[in-house]
Image (tube, rainbow, N blue to C red):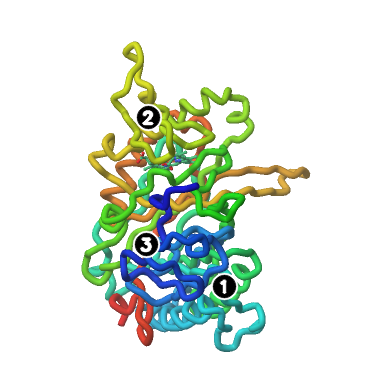
Amino acid sequence: RLSRRHVFGYAGAAGLGGAAGVVAGRATAGSDDAAAQRVGGRTYLAHGDHQSGILTPTPAVGELVAFDLLPSVDRTALGRLMRVWSGDVAALAAGRPVPGDAAPDLAQAGVSLSILIGLGPRVFDLPGLAAARPTGFQEIPPMAHDRLEDRWSGGDLLAWVSADDATSVAHAVRRLTTDAAPFARPRWTQRGSWRPVDADGNPVTGRNLFGQLDGSANPSGETLTATVFSTDGWLAGGTQLVVRRIEMNLATWDELTRDRQERVIGRALDTGAPLTGTAEHDDVDLTAAVDGVPVIAADAHARVAHPSHNSGRRMLRRGLNYTHEEWIDGSWTSSAGLIFTAFQASIADQFIPVQRMLDQGDALNEWTTAIGSAVFVIPPGFAEGAWLAQGLLG
Ligand code: HEM
């Protein structure tokens, strides 16, 4: 049985009071019954202080679509698109078709659908918006281990659709893309999956394709709020998102002994416990040593990424696993990895210094390579009758 501590989204979202609400099967804060903890089969209300898709649990299927604005789009036109998308987001989340929906029967409640909308750096180059660029919002500078490809990088807008099933995701993506067509065209699409639930339907920390529990040390409670949400002007209640497509070399990872795999991270594979503890949520003890040798190695990922190694800097990670097959030079090639995403109040103050630290000293670099990079401002949530980024564009 799990502790509920690491399950952000149910009690967590309710406790924050302003996160997008849940209409079907809503958990009452503090309730312990199994139904309230169920993962999947949810209907998340789109309206609230924060967009849903940040604190709501990661459903099984996610698709991130980045768009490029058409050259004709100015601040006013972008405002029109945000009004249209806000209506779409509210309708689709509630299980209603959007206006003019060509496949209205695909709209369905109870599929844990959430849609997260973001704005890329070039939005703040549009006339009249330069002064509104949020503090700390910037592209990730080149890192020594990066092998970035244009096809997974950049973008002026983001729509990140999550749901329990790929059909619901495909329908929502198609509606958003169709409605955006007068303003923007898709630049890249990344699809991934996550398994945030155990065999009995209880929420758990999901595993990445190396088999590791991934997300255990995510912040919770007040630390989570302070880590993620901006208090800066029009962005108050919003956040900043980094999307990195990180290829994982499963072939060479598989050759390692289990013991070596655990030392690379500093955590046990089965329980996710730090090598200095016994349970997943035990604190990582970076001072523990045996015969003068640190239990968590100097280059272990859990040490180098740890807040105490990074002047207290944190982020909220919410990854998706991907596999990708391509026909190259007459044969099929497959690759796999993590669509790594991190939310924080300031990319410059949080993600970038931690990423620099990892670039220089993380044992994991031998098996992981960033091949895509993008950054987005995630506007705050919106109330009924209002629209996304109204504080910026209204
Ligand atoms: C922790 C895997 C990339 C930041 C962890 C953990 C695993 C993991 C297994 C320990 C469990 C947990 O707390 O979630 C990976 C893999 C990566 C990757 C497989 C690449 C494919 C990154 C990147 C960053 C990052 C790019 C940030 C720049 C963190 C942080 C923690 C963490 C902040 C928590 C440290 C703590 O508070 O103890 N990661 N990670 N990771 N990772 Fe990563």
Element under disc 2: helix
Q: Which residue is at the far top?
A: 291
Is residue 52 among the parts visible in the rendering? yes
Q: Is residue 94 left or right of residue 220?
A: right
The residue under the point 51% across, 79% down is 94
The CA distance from mark 1 to mark 2 is: 44 Å
Q: Which residue is denoted by mark 1 in the rendering?
A: 110
Q: Is residue 351 above or below residue 17?
A: above
- Residue located at (74% from left, 44% from top): 332
Please state which of the two labelled residues, at mark 1 or mark 3, is closer to the viewer: 3
Q: CA distance from mark 1 to mark 3?
A: 22 Å
Q: Which residue is mark 3?
A: 30
Nearest to the eye among marks 1 and 2: give it. Answer: 1
- Tell me: is circle 1 under 8 Å from ligand 1: no
Kind of residue indicated by mark 3: Gly
Residue 353: x, y in percent? 30, 42
SS at circle 3: loop
Q: Which mark is residue 361?
A: 2
Q: Amino acid at mark 1?
A: Gly
- Amino acid, disc 2: Gly
Q: Is residue 178 above or below residue 318?
A: below
